[in-house]
Image (cartoon, helix red, strand yellow):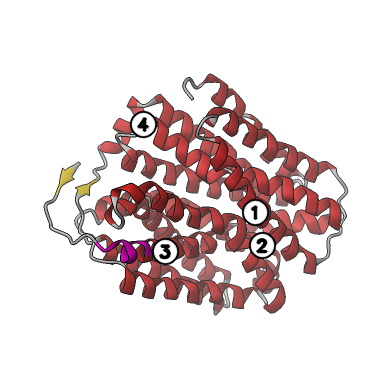
Amino acid sequence: MTTTTTPTTTPTPVRGWLAVLAVTLGIFSLMTSELLPVGLLTPVGTDLDVSEGTAGLMVTVPGIVAAVSAPLVTVATGRVDRRIVLAVLIALMGLANLASAFATHFAVVLAARFFVGVSVGGFWSIAGGIALRLVPEKHVTRATAVIFGGVETASVLGVPAGTFLGDLGGWRPAFAAVGVLGLVSLMGILILTPRIPARRTLGFADLPLVWKGNAGVRAGIVLTLLVITGHFLAYTFIRPILQGDGIADNMIGVLLLTFGVAGICGNFIAGALIGRWLRPTVAGIAVVLAAAMLLVAFTDTGVLTAGALMVLWGLGYGAVPVTFQTWIIDAAPDTTEAASSLYVSAFNIAIALGALLGGLAVDGIGATAAPLLGAALALLALPVVLRRRGR
C-alpha cells in the first residue's frame, strides 16, 4: 500500500453522523437494486418474454461484475477523493435503474444491470472503511455497524418492499423507485459528506498476500461462498417456488416482508451472540438456513405455513452479513481493507453463482430442486466452521 499526505478537515460530530447516514442510504439503495429482481422475476420474464431461469441473469450479471469491480474500482480510484467516487457510483446506479424501468428488450435490462454491478462492488468496498474518516475514533465501530446495516437492511427489507411495490404497480415502477432513491442518495452524499482525500492506496499485490497468509480469511471466504450461494440458489426463485405451492401472487410480497422483518430480528440476535460465540453462531446460521430450505422443498405450504418458514429463513439470513463481516475483521484486524475487498468479491460471486445455478435447476429440473441444492451447500459450511480454530 502507498500513503498520500493530502490534508483533510475532520467534520464535526453532527455532520459526520449525517454523512454516515447518507452513505448508509447509498449502500441500502445499491444492495436493494442488486437484489430487487429476486421478487420480480416472473413479471419481468412475462413482460419481456424470457423464462424465469433467464430472468435470473438480472441477479447473476451484477453479482459477477460487482465481484470484479470491488477490488478494481478501489485500486483504480485510490488517489481520488472518496466523496467523488461514491457520488459517481451512486449516480450510475440510479440512472441504470431508470433505464431498466423504461426498457423494452431484456438485453437493455442486462446492460443496465452490468452498470449496477460496477456501482455495487466499488461503493461497498470503499464505504466499508469510510467511517474512520467521518466520525471521532470512539464512534468508528458504531458508525461502521450503521453503514453495514444498509447492506443487511437491503437484503432483508429493501427487496421485500420492492416486491410489494411491484405487486401493486408493476415491475417498472419498482425499478424506477429504486433509481429515484439512488438519486436522492446522491444528493445526500454531495450535500452532507465532506471531502475525503485518499490516505492509503490498496494495490493488487496486497490481495493475494492476505489470501495466502491468513487461514482465517480463507475460511471466511469459503464460508461466504457456500452459505450465500446456497441461500441465493433458492431465494432468487422463491416466487415461482411459492407459486408452485399455490400461494397467490398478491401474497408473495407480504411473505417477503415477513422474511424481512424476521431478518432484522436475526441481525440483532446475531449481534448479541457473535462477541462471545462467533463460530457457534456461524454453524447455527448454516443449520437454520438448511432447515428452512428443506422445509420449503418438502412441505405443501399454505399462507400460514409459508409465513412460518419465511420467519425461520429470515432469522437465519438476517444474521449472515454482520456475522460473516465480523469473522473477516476478527481474522484480519491489521489488513481489514484488503480482506474486506476479498469478502465483498466473494459475497457478490456467491450471489451471481447462486442465481445462475438456481436458474439451471429451475429450468432443467423444477422449482423444488433449487432449495434442495441450496440446503446442501449450506450444510457443507459446517465442516469448515468445525475445522477453523479460534473463537
Instruction: Name which residue lies at 32% across and 43% down.
Output: 337
Instruction: Name which residue lies at 56% across and 60% down.
Output: 58
* Label 3 crowd (10 A; few <14 / some 14-19 / many >=20): many
Mark linked to residue 236: 1
Task: Indicate whether residue 367 is drawn in magenta.
Answer: no
Q: Position of residue 224 (x, y in %)?
A: 52, 38
Q: Position of residue 172 (x, y in %)?
A: 60, 76
Q: Position of residue 108 (x, y in %)?
A: 51, 71
Residue ID for mark 2: 39
Q: Position of residue 244 (x, y in %)?
A: 82, 56
Residue ID for mark 3: 21
Q: CA distance from mark 4 to mark 1?
A: 29 Å
Question: Image quarter for residue 133?
Answer: bottom left
Q: Amino acid at mark 2?
A: Gly
Residue 301 lies left or right of residue 131; in this view the side is right
Q: Which of disc 2 and disc 4 is earlier in sequence?
A: 2
* Label 4 crowd (10 A; few <14 / some 14-19 / many >=20): some
Q: Amino acid at mark 3?
A: Leu
Is residue 184 in view? yes
Q: Nearer the viewer, mark 4 or mark 3?
A: 3
Residue nearer the viewer, 21 or 223 = 21
Residue ID for mark 4: 211
206 in relation to 4, above or below? above
Residue 4 lies left or right of residue 165; in this view the side is left
377 in relation to 337, above or below? above
C-beta proximity under 8 Å, tags 4 and 1: no
